[in-house]
Image (cartoon, helix red, strand yellow):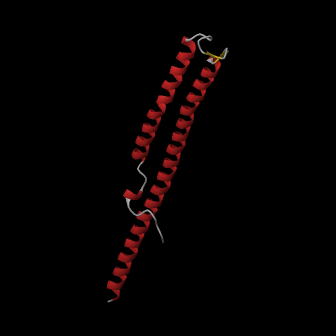
């Protein structure tokens, strides 16, 4: 029988994955801060102050802020997908490792029985 997971160290480290995911989400918070700053700028300045060639940029800034916020939402969704995949991998690897351990035990018992038979045959 062939097993690719024969040591617990070969199983994905969910704690490390989670730490990386938290780092990504923390960094993504900067997008929220940026969006809030853009919204604040759009609401603080009047439409005339935000105009270029007599066309106000205020709605554009608000749309930009919404787009920036969406980046964070997308990052969080990506992180959730990473977490989910890591859990699935961990489960599959743990199952394989447990199967390996069961196989080892069965082999140990088989060899012990074989040795006992050989000892009784003498």
Residue 116, given in percent of the width and then of the height, sits at: 34, 80
Left or right? Give the position of 86 relative to 51: left
Between residues 101 and 36, which one lies in front from this camera angle? 36
Determine the residue located farthest toward the bottom in the rendered image: 122
Split into 4 quadrants, where in the image is the C terminus? bottom left
The image shows residue 41, relative to residue 17, as above or below, that is: above
Residue at 48% in and 33% down: 28
The image shows residue 49, relative to residue 34, as above or below, that is: above
Q: How many marks?
A: 0
Residue at 60% in and 21% down: 61
The image shows residue 114, relative to residue 95, as above or below, that is: below
Residue at 43% in and 53% down: 12
Determine the residue located farthest toward the front in the rendered image: 53
Between residues 112 and 43, which one lies in front from this camera angle? 43
Residue 44, given in percent of the width and then of the height, sits at: 54, 11
Between residues 29 and 9, which one lies in front from this camera angle? 29
Residue 106, given in percent of the width and then of the height, sits at: 42, 70
The image shows residue 112, relative to residue 32, as above or below, that is: below
Q: Could you say which quadrant of the image residue 102 lies in?
A: bottom left
Q: Could you say which quadrant of the image residue 104 lies in?
A: bottom left
Q: Could you say which quadrant of the image residue 15 lies in?
A: top left
Between residues 30 and 85, which one lies in front from this camera angle? 30
Residue 3, given in percent of the width and then of the height, sits at: 46, 67
Left or right? Give the position of 11 relative to 62: left
């Amino acid at each position: 029988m062939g097993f690719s997971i024969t040591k617990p160290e070969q199983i994905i480290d969910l704690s490390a994955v989670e730490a990386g995911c938290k780092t990504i989400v923390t960094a993504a918070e900067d997008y929220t801060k940026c969006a809030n700053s853009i919204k604040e700028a759009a609401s603080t300045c009047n439409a005339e102050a935000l105009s270029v060639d007599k066309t106000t940029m205020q709605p554009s800034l608000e749309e930009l802020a919404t787009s920036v916020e969406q980046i964070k939402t997308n990052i969080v969704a990506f992180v959730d997908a990473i977490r989910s995949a890591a859990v699935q991998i961990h489960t599959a690897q743990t199952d394989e490792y447990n199967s390996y351990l069961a196989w080892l035990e069965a082999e140990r018992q088989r060899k012990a029985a074989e040795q006992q038979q050989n000892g009784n045959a003498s």
